[in-house]
Amino acid sequence: MTQVVLSETHGKVGLIRINRPEAMNALNNDVVDGIGSAIDAFEADAEIGCMVITGNDKAFAAGADIGFMKDFDYMHAYQSDFITRNWERVKTARKPVIAAVAGFALGGGCELAMMCDMIFAADSAKFGQPEIKLGTLPGAGGTQRLPRAIGKAKAMDLCLSGRFMDAAEAEKSGLVARVIAADQLLEETLKAAQTIAAYSLPVVMMIKESINRAFESSLNEGLLFERRVFHASFALADQKEGMAAFVDKRKPEFKNR
């Protein structure tokens, strides 16, 4: 049986690759469980400071596997806790996760990319939530994360029309952090991930947690959380090293503590 999720290590970066090319990397439980297992392993590895999830040049993931779920009834979807049980492991990762998207990121593929902390898109990338064409609606965050990323009007447009959004529009709309030439996507994404992984891991995790807090709380509550975490950073040996290195005009040597 073909391994539907591949993982490998690039220095301090964990790379997770969806590997169902014959199905345009469509997502089913085997794929999602494989992604979750890879995340678990990289989270447990003290040497890993950042993760990248990618597909291939034709598709990041062209949606959920329709054949896999077309015969579900309500009770099966509800009792099996479909999506909630395993699809959102990306969201709960404490280390940063970058989606490197080339080709199609549609439906569940777009939702998976949005669960990551940021999206780097090849200039060939296409994003969309075309579930309406199948007589259903996004169920893995498409109606919730998309408006938070690109605003209500754009999200309504994509979800109600089923149209695709190219990489340039996605970057302009705020869905995508960077657009990169397709033949350089993985190289540039890994380079950015290596930059992040070279910093103090506790601080990286604090920043991720603080930014995510901005979407879950009022401004005043978010500012209070940020201030407390900022104060806590002064307990880190890495803070002492980072500031001493700045004063000494040398490169810091972070120890992740």
Image (cartoon, grey):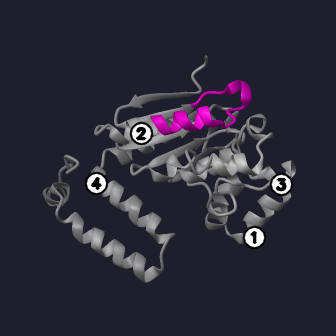
Q: Can you tell which quarter of the image residue 228 is in? A: bottom left
Mark with earlier residue (1, 2) = 2
Per the image, label 3 sits on a secondary structure element best described as helix
Mark 1 = which residue?
153
Q: CA distance from mark 4 to mark 2?
A: 18 Å
Disc 1 residue type? Ala
Q: CA distance from mark 2 to mark 3?
A: 33 Å
Mark with earlier residue (2, 3) = 2
Disc 4 residue type? Pro
Q: In which quadrant will I find the N terminus? A: top right
| Residue 25 is a magenta residue | yes
Mark 2 = which residue?
40
Q: Which residues are magenta?
A: 18-37
Mark 4 = which residue?
202
Q: Are marks 3 and 4 in contact (CB under 8 Å)?
A: no
Type of secondary structure dominating the magenta stretch: helix
Disc 4 vs disc 2: which is toward the camera? 2
Mark 3 = which residue?
132
**In the foreground, 19 or 255:** 19
Please report the residue visible at 15 percent of the width from the left and 59 percent of the height from the top. Answer: 240
| Residue 228 is a magenta residue | no
Q: Is residue 188 visible?
A: no
Q: Is residue 121 depicted above or below 21 in this figure?
A: below
